[in-house]
Structure formats: C-alpha cells, structure tokens
Amino acid sequence: MEYKLLIGNNFIFGNPKKAYYKNSQLFDIDADKDGPFINTEVYDINGNKIIEIKKNNLLLCNSKLDKKVLRRDHLLITDKNGEILIESRVYGKDTIIISGTFIVDEVKLTITQNYILLPDGKRIMHSKVKADNNSFIITEDGIKLKNNFMI
C-alpha cells in the first residue's frame, strides 16, 4: 500500500519512513491494512517524555495533558492551554496528516496544518518530495530526502 504524508502544507509522497529535524528523529510512519500510522515520543523542554505513540495507539501521556481524540484514524493531544502537542489524522486510508510541537536541542519546532515554523521564525510550506521509501529532513530550505542531505 502506498501512502503519503501531509505535514505543514508540505507533501511527501511515496511512503516516507522517518522525519528528522537537525539530528533528531521527530517521528516515523508506516502503514498496515488499516492505513498509515505514526510512532513517536514527545518530550517537554526539560527532556521529560510526555507522550509515546506506537501504531497510532497512545501508550504514555502525561496526566497534565488533554486527550481530545484517541482513535486509530485520529489522535489529538493538547496542553492545558489548548496548544496541539501531537495530532495524527488518516484520510482515505492512504494519507496521514501530522501536526504538533517537538522540542529539539531545547528549541521548539511547531508543525501546523498550514506550515512548519522553525525556531528562528521561518515558515516552511509548499514542498513536494517523493520519498521512495526513504526518510526526510526538515531544513531551512524546505523538506529534503535524508540520504541526500548531510546533518
């Protein structure tokens, strides 16, 4: 089954595997008979794991967070202020949309449905990448295949 990822208004076609920012893995995705799914661990600014997800199933969630939606095709977890910490939605069994807030090297990377907001304020959107079963990296110049980019 071929699936695609929509992340911050950037399209990654051809079964992308892992998403990176700098030298840190944000999440990995794959698919089974029920469609694409996400695996990830989300940390707070102090380096504490606050969320763990495997195959779109919530395994760990800090008690201070709000579990808005907990379904295989839609996960939504927010903080006490309503800010999305992680959202994963599956459309039509072949598209997964991922949004969230990721702490990397003590800075915040924000992925909305409309753009990826880098820690320096730059917005990344409208990249189209064919992954061909490879991983990708979010850079200041857009989305790049990881095997073509040196960290």
Image: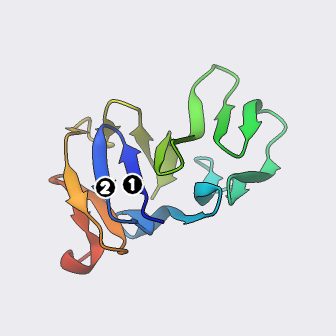
Quarter of the image for residue 31 reads bottom right
**Residue sitting at the far left:** 141
At label 2, the amino acid type is Ile
Q: Relative to 120, is 146 above or below?
A: below
Q: Position of residue 138 (x, y in %)?
A: 30, 57
| Residue ID at (41%, 39%) | 111
Which is nearer the N-term, disc 2 or disc 1?
1
Q: Work out whether residue 140 or residue 17 is closer to the camera in this orientation and state it.
A: 17
Q: Position of residue 54 (x, y in %)?
A: 70, 61
Q: Which mark is residue 33?
A: none
User: Marks 2 and 1, Cα distance to the nearest angstrom?
Assistant: 6 Å
Q: Position of residue 39 (x, y in %)?
A: 62, 61
Residue of label 2: 12
Label 2 SS:
strand
Residue of label 1: 4
Given contact means CB atoms under 8 Å apart, are the residues at marks 2 and 1 in contact?
A: yes
Quarter of the image for residue 75 reads top right
**Residue sitting at the far right:** 63
Question: Is the residue marked by circle 1 packed among few (<14), some (14-19), or many (20+) residues within 10 Å?
Answer: many
Q: Position of residue 19 (x, y in %)?
A: 41, 62
Q: Work out whether residue 119 or residue 127 is closer to the camera in this orientation and state it.
A: 127
**Residue sitting at the far top:** 81
Q: Work out whether residue 63 or residue 127 is closer to the camera in this orientation and state it.
A: 127
Label 1 SS:
strand
| Residue ID at (58%, 55%) | 35
| Residue ID at (80%, 52%) | 60
At label 1, the amino acid type is Lys
Q: Work out whether residue 76 or residue 12 is closer to the camera in this orientation and state it.
A: 12
Give the left or right position of residue 63, taking residue 9 as reference: right
